[in-house]
Amino acid sequence: AQSVTQLDSQVPVFEEAPVELRCNYSSSVSVYLFWYVQYPNQGLQLLLKYLSGSTLVKGINGFEAEFNKSQTSFHLRKPSVHISDTAEYFCAVSDVNRDDKIIFGKGTRLHILP
Amino acid sequence: NAGVTQTPKFRILKIGQSMTLQCTQDMNHNYMYWYRQDPGMGLKLIYYSVGAGITDKGEVPNGYNVSRSTTEDFPLRLELAAPSQTSVYFCASGPPTLNTEAFFGQGTRLTVV
């Protein structure tokens, strides 16, 4: 079964600094990959997704992620963070070849320091 | 657009009480899900449904029941509430191609005392 590992439970970053949130998934089969963001006291919303094609995926709010099949990774990056990026970020994966559910990681809480 | 609507937003239950968490979506999605979110534990799937009349267990179904009589509605029932069910519950829906996206409701914060 698929699993997702988010290596950092919390990441503190100074405002306007770059950030990378790490995500690795377990299986080498064909996958769809997602990053979701959850702002305080809200539901999750989709930040970006990789379904096929270019391995560099651009999402909302200046975020991007790169799919690396050999390393089974899908790290999320932003070149310059803003205080409004304070949120919890979830990586998720689903199996292309199975009509199955999306599996979520445990989340990474991004703290933006002034 | 309403999207996925959950009610109530907050609820306190006593041990042994029952309640139903409501979820409705207006996007004509076939797939619907219930997750629970506990601090530092991510999202765990409780039940999901691939269409009206069809439901299936997720990772943590014990203590919960669901039904899917219409495409729009997917209520989650707690029959005998326990403190371990204190959590934030999220309903989500997805288009027929299951694994391309999930749309989430705002959540229900449930406390069992």
Image (spheres, coloured by chain):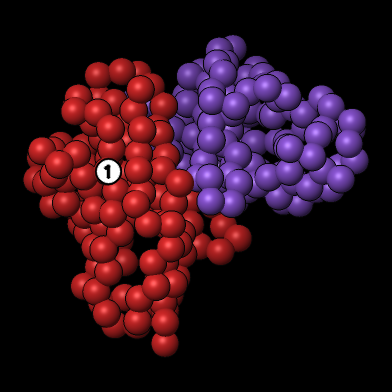
Vertical comparison of A110 with A4: above or below: below
Is A29 left, or right, of B68 in this rendering?
Answer: left
Callout 1, which amino acid? Asn
Placement of the C terminus of chain B among the 4 image quadrants: top right
What residue is pinned by disc 1? A24
Q: Which chain is red?
A: A
Between residues B19 and A68, which one lies in front from this camera angle? A68
Q: Mark 1 — on which chain does it sit?
A: A
Please report the residue visible at 32 percent of the width from the left and 36 percent of the height from the top: A93
Q: Residue at x 44, y 72 (%)?
A: A111
Give how far across and how far down residue A71 sits, in percent.
Answer: 15, 41
Q: Position of residue A86 (x, y in %)?
A: 45, 70
The image quadrant of residue A80 is bottom left
Identify whether A100 is placed above or below B11. above
Quarter of the image where one finds residue B37 = top right
SS class of the residue under badge 1? strand
